[in-house]
Amino acid sequence: MYVVKSPLSEADLKTVSAALQGALVDLVDLSLVGKQIHWNVVGPRFRSIHLQLDGVVATARMHSDIVAERAATLGVSPDGRAGTVAAQSAVGRVPEGWVNDTDAVSTLVAALGAVITRMRERVEATAEPDPVSQDIFISITADLEKHHWMFQAENG
Amino acid sequence: MYVVKSPLSEADLKTVSAALQGALVDLVDLSLVGKQIHWNVVGPRFRSIHLQLDGVVATARMHSDIVAERAATLGVSPDGRAGTVAAQSAVGRVPEGWVNDTDAVSTLVAALGAVITRMRERVEATAEPDPVSQDIFISITADLEKHHWMFQAENG
Amino acid sequence: MYVVKSPLSEADLKTVSAALQGALVDLVDLSLVGKQIHWNVVGPRFRSIHLQLDGVVATARMHSDIVAERAATLGVSPDGRAGTVAAQSAVGRVPEGWVNDTDAVSTLVAALGAVITRMRERVEATAEPDPVSQDIFISITADLEKHHWMFQAENG
Amino acid sequence: MYVVKSPLSEADLKTVSAALQGALVDLVDLSLVGKQIHWNVVGPRFRSIHLQLDGVVATARMHSDIVAERAATLGVSPDGRAGTVAAQSAVGRVPEGWVNDTDAVSTLVAALGAVITRMRERVEATAEPDPVSQDIFISITADLEKHHWMFQAENG
Amino acid sequence: MYVVKSPLSEADLKTVSAALQGALVDLVDLSLVGKQIHWNVVGPRFRSIHLQLDGVVATARMHSDIVAERAATLGVSPDGRAGTVAAQSAVGRVPEGWVNDTDAVSTLVAALGAVITRMRERVEATAEPDPVSQDIFISITADLEKHHWMFQAENG
Amino acid sequence: MYVVKSPLSEADLKTVSAALQGALVDLVDLSLVGKQIHWNVVGPRFRSIHLQLDGVVATARMHSDIVAERAATLGVSPDGRAGTVAAQSAVGRVPEGWVNDTDAVSTLVAALGAVITRMRERVEATAEPDPVSQDIFISITADLEKHHWMFQAENG
Amino acid sequence: MYVVKSPLSEADLKTVSAALQGALVDLVDLSLVGKQIHWNVVGPRFRSIHLQLDGVVATARMHSDIVAERAATLGVSPDGRAGTVAAQSAVGRVPEGWVNDTDAVSTLVAALGAVITRMRERVEATAEPDPVSQDIFISITADLEKHHWMFQAENG
Amino acid sequence: MYVVKSPLSEADLKTVSAALQGALVDLVDLSLVGKQIHWNVVGPRFRSIHLQLDGVVATARMHSDIVAERAATLGVSPDGRAGTVAAQSAVGRVPEGWVNDTDAVSTLVAALGAVITRMRERVEATAEPDPVSQDIFISITADLEKHHWMFQAENG
Amino acid sequence: MYVVKSPLSEADLKTVSAALQGALVDLVDLSLVGKQIHWNVVGPRFRSIHLQLDGVVATARMHSDIVAERAATLGVSPDGRAGTVAAQSAVGRVPEGWVNDTDAVSTLVAALGAVITRMRERVEATAEPDPVSQDIFISITADLEKHHWMFQAENG
Amino acid sequence: MYVVKSPLSEADLKTVSAALQGALVDLVDLSLVGKQIHWNVVGPRFRSIHLQLDGVVATARMHSDIVAERAATLGVSPDGRAGTVAAQSAVGRVPEGWVNDTDAVSTLVAALGAVITRMRERVEATAEPDPVSQDIFISITADLEKHHWMFQAENG
Amino acid sequence: MYVVKSPLSEADLKTVSAALQGALVDLVDLSLVGKQIHWNVVGPRFRSIHLQLDGVVATARMHSDIVAERAATLGVSPDGRAGTVAAQSAVGRVPEGWVNDTDAVSTLVAALGAVITRMRERVEATAEPDPVSQDIFISITADLEKHHWMFQAENG
Amino acid sequence: MYVVKSPLSEADLKTVSAALQGALVDLVDLSLVGKQIHWNVVGPRFRSIHLQLDGVVATARMHSDIVAERAATLGVSPDGRAGTVAAQSAVGRVPEGWVNDTDAVSTLVAALGAVITRMRERVEATAEPDPVSQDIFISITADLEKHHWMFQAENG
């Protein structure tokens, strides 16, 4: 049986791997929600939001790959399957169908807000057990908070 | 209320939009399954399959964007949310945890095979109602069948 | 005298060359109208539409070159001169002077709609006589319909 | 109503905007004539002239965009529609149908010559009223005269 | 023994694989003939034809790879060996030694003409059995007919 | 002591160096004001104006470097320090804090307008003493007036 | 009124926003001082220092943008106007006029040293309140200290 | 005599510089061992491991440069000479001669494991004295642990 | 009749042109055999060998062009037609049909070995008569021997 | 006989063509002198001046091509042969052999100074007869004066 | 006084440095002659030869830099000044004024032929004294002979 | 046991492999020494020499890879481990600690000189046994001697 000897203690590994698996699910879902609204947004600001969402999707895809490979690096199998994502994501279910541009902005403000809250908890939780993973969560939080600002500014 | 006047008759639109929505779900799931195994594969052929799967993911992501935007173009809202994907995908549920390299190849052969079967039906179904959408399904089938060959050849 | 021996029968060639010449005129005019509004649009959405129109112009220029060279390939001299374009285009005459952004969107929705209708007829007309030319019309239709969606979505 | 406050006096603006509108029409037509012969040229020098003409078209398109946006910058709506171009261009009507390579060269020598003559008048007319616009006309003249030389040299 | 389960019926597969194998042989030979004349052409138009032939070779190499991999994708072993090419190609044997530029153009007009005739038959033959392969033959025909036009135009 | 022997007479040099120093201060301040609003703009048009302002900043930075190095070239030490910029700029002080998108556009229209007025005076003042410096001022004016148009058009 | 709900407590936000605003002012001034000496340096090492300073300017500009957008992200309006920079910067006023190369090196050693001291205080001050901002200050310190070493080494 | 005034206290500097010098030696040796096996590996997986090792070498070279320049930045002379590396590296001596692919993987698992252990100690040791250096060690550990996972996965 | 005055004596030319013609045939055949196995290889190492063979094909194509143009440069018409290649190549006939990965490696070891033997003879034969051609043969041998090593190492 | 009908009067053409021919000779010689010192400079500043001179050579080559083609454009044959350059250049003969770095700087200051003096006369002489050529001389003067400043600053 | 200790004996150095200096002069002159005809060629093949000559100029400039720096490397000052080139070049004086395309080809055939003859002598002369310099002469000869073939082929 | 059948006789192989192994050790050490001084150099010329040394390191790394893979190609295991390099290199031990710029130049002149001497012996020793390896040694010598010149010129 395949076993990677983790550089972390068992207790630390438990904390860190929970944080990584949670982040993976949130980020995969964020990438799917970002695309969903990329396709369904309508209204005078269609083009601007359509393009802006591809930036969110690119961020979410890049970081989901990093956290999943970090889990594997620590010897923990990551789970990013559709069913797992649907069941465990913090993003919240977005309604089906067309979305007008103002609602699209609000949806992203809410979705990013929910993911950021959990990501900041992960920054804190992993500080002691694994500063390497913490550094990844810090980078993710920085990128998501920047996207969050931009959507909030559009409501300003 | 937002309405795009479709260039297709109502009956044709029903056929074509069902085909596009089905393809969207299959392709999004294929991209998630491709990443899942990209992260979880182990064994002597790890590196080769790990890289090969990024090709599958890139193909699936590119075409999922094309079919979703084609649906929007015809005035039909596409649905690529995690829950929808988990419920409707043809790919089939892959097991959690590490996957040895031989099983990884078999999983992809099966997953691609299932998607290709449905994609060929869409090529046929859309030939009359909308040759523009059919042309998209032909391109997708060509790309997926090429990936299918490569995984089969590895079992040869 | 210069004669290219066409691979098509005379009757088929007549059908196909009429389709190609018609598409050439429509596409050249679409590129000119796209630039006209690119320069004359005003209003809060100026920058977004100004940029979006360069995408339409690039599409129209690329495909006008393809259909003209396809005509030459079949031994038929293409005609894309200003006078011919002004006389035969399906786009319809756009008014001179500044255009506010909402009118700019409507103008493009109408212009693209008119060209698409004729392009879909060409897809049908050339299916039997020359599948190679038909494939070109399918690609053009796909691209124009995508632009059409985006302008319609901005009215959503 | 939309008004850009021009930095020029009314009399100067009249001179400069006439020069810009005239240049726009000439350059758009030059781009259409360049493509027309790009598609219709035949003869032993086909490939060389076919490629050379894409250089003329690129020059004409680039500068037509610059003069149109300069007009808009000065608060004057530019007009580059097919009908306007057909009615006002200095290029002269080129015959329809195939053109042998020697005639293609002569046509370009004549077309460029006609546009250059008018462009040099614009350099002179705008020197006092608007040195910024004059600088644009100087650049255009430089580029067109270089193309002119190359076609003349081919007749040498 | 290695067996790829083809998505086609046995009868359809026979038709399609014959078309693919025939196209492979024609395209490999076209690439060799293109290079042969690229090296052996002499005369005032040497440089132009020398460069033009590299375009033909690039087209032929790209499409030979696509048709061979399409055959493998359908479970049929492609054969592009020198002996097979020499025995089965439609291109016809070109004479050894230097070729003056006018003869070079005529040779290419003939070679491309012969391959195009067979390629159009393949477009027709594969329409029903496998629209995916047909789409490949349509693309190849489009590219070869464009090269064909350019060499014919040089004889104009 | 370091002395560059200027190619200009003392009187001409005085005129030209005053123009260059004035332009340097205006352009550095324009780059700082452009960034200030890039960071502080809010409202539905946030993203569009945020991006548009990076274009203004890039223009201002590029030209500030050119005029400063031109001064050095003529043997005159350029002064682009924060205190000098704060004291001598034509741009005018922009208020601190968030700026809604409509006010942001107005601020840029005013700021660009003020700089352009002074830049046109420099074009005139340097025509006789140093056509090389004049040519630089013409290029700057052309670029700033184009930005000016775009912000004005957004108020149209 | 526009309010971004900050993820930080009020006390933490006060600490962090003071650090970000201070860093913004220092970095903008460093970019202006860097350019000032880039233009005014003379002496045998002119070219080397002239080029080296563009590296400092690029670093300062990149990080000033990052800290300003981080402030906005936390809901705090950044202030990078010339007057603010002139009043609050740690860099210290550099003399006007030409600078010989040895003095230029010393000026940079002093300027970078002053900014680094304050930046290290910010690293410490933000560790608890906001590790995301702290990570930004760590990166800035790393880059500035590397530049500091290089100018010190030139005095070695 | 050349002295860089370090921003750290003497005690902190001693800790940090020991960590940097140790990391330098380990990383230089890792780059040499990576190349040694890149050249000497044999077996069915030759090509895959040969390529994979160039990734390890690139990582090791990039980070060895960063830690050496960080030492210099803190005023401590780095030592990366062959004799020093041979004497002090944690990597362990690899045998001379050909290495079969399975042994190559094991050698890298061991070498990376040894370096990672020491690198994690450096992360801890430098947290208080110098968070800037710590951040560098965190990045190095992240990269090395990712390589470590990939070689372990190949043994899975 | 076309005659290039060769810089070599008649005897030397005979030796050198025989070497170049022989190399041309070997290299064209190597490119065809490389592609043949690229398409037909199966087995667990499929992907690695499939990619590796494209490197061989690129090498063979690049050098076949160089030797053919070198022959033309010396006034000798090169012959790279399919029939000539089939008749004169040193590579040896490879069997039709699928090839498992181990056999594919062996086939390449043999094919490269045969070509290298002849290429080393050409290095020797041309040393005196034409060091320019010899230098080409040395480069070819270096590249082919490197490929040879890599395939042998996979059998190690 | 080949005659280009110049857009200038005979008298104007005489003035302009003398200016262009003089500039051509100066610029070709500057490129040769720049390379001569690029190869022969020695001393502690070797590397810096060696690189700086490639910038001068690139400028001189680019502008020599522009003025020669401008002459041809006006129907006047340009003469840039070595003998003509040696006889007519303003640069002055530089001594053979090694040049220490201080002398190299002085040589360039003198050479650039001599060329600039004549180039400023050409700016003046061509203002009336041909503003298009004048614009070229203005650009050349701007570039050469910038190089002149940099070499002077190194003597500062 | 500056002395590079050459790795060659005095006698060998004399031979090699004479060869390098001779090659430098020939190559600089070839670059000047290539440009001279690039500007002065007229006739139906103008464009093709105009472009082809830029290839010759690029080759000549690249190799002149290599041989001059090789001389410096051996401690011998290279001389590429206009007067030296005019006096010592093997190329032969080309007439002033326009050149028709056929004469242009003949001039290049002659010029390249003359340089190649001397270059082959240098290959022979340097074989014993300095194989490093010989290798440079072999590369130059290969490139020049390829250009020579292409111009000869145009006369074929 | 792994055996590559070398194309060389046993005696020749012994000579060539000794040369390759010696070159490998020298080049690896040169890359380490180059980096050592890249990090430790101080003085007014710091930046210039710091950059120049990266060129030496790039050269040394590139060629060390080439000679090691050449040894493997001939069936001889290369040894580039730190201990081997420390024991066998020709470069000579450089002192630890900071190096002022003048000493840095002298160190490189000496190090390159020592390696070049041995490399020229290898050029001679391998001429008969293996011209392919000799060609590699000639390229290495050319590159090292060029670096040697540049450092010597800085002492001029």
Image: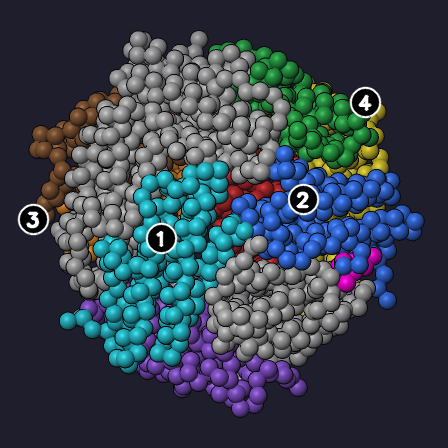
Chain colours: A brown, B orange, C red, D yellow, F green, I purple, J blue, L cyan
Check whether the beta carbons of the residues at disc 3 and disc 2 lie within 8 A of each other: no
B113 in magenta = no
Crowding near pointer 4: few (<14 within 10 Å), some, many (20+)?
few
Q: Secondary structure at mark 3?
A: loop
Instruction: Evaluate whether residue F94 shows in this view.
Output: yes
Residue I125, compared with residue C143, is above or below; it is below
Q: Which is in the foreground here, disc 3 or disc 4?
A: 3
Check whether the beta carbons of the residues at disc 2 and disc 4 lie within 8 A of each other: no
Crowding near pointer 3: few (<14 within 10 Å), some, many (20+)?
few
Q: Which residue is mark 2?
A: J106
State the extent of the magenta-drawn residues as a range: J76-85
Work out which quarter of the rendered image holds the N terminus of chain L and state it: bottom left
Mark 3 on the same chain as mark 2: no
J82 in magenta = yes
Q: Which residue is mark 1?
A: L31
Cα separation, mark 4 vs mark 1, equals 70 Å
Q: Which residue is mark 4?
A: D10
Cα separation, mark 1 vs mark 2, equals 37 Å
Cα separation, mark 1 vs mark 3, equals 43 Å
- x 27%, y 80%: residue: L11
Q: Which residue is mark 3?
A: A1
Mark 1 on the same chain as mark 2: no
- x 9%, y 33%: residue: A9
Q: Amino acid at mark 2?
A: Ser
Q: Amino acid at mark 4?
A: Glu
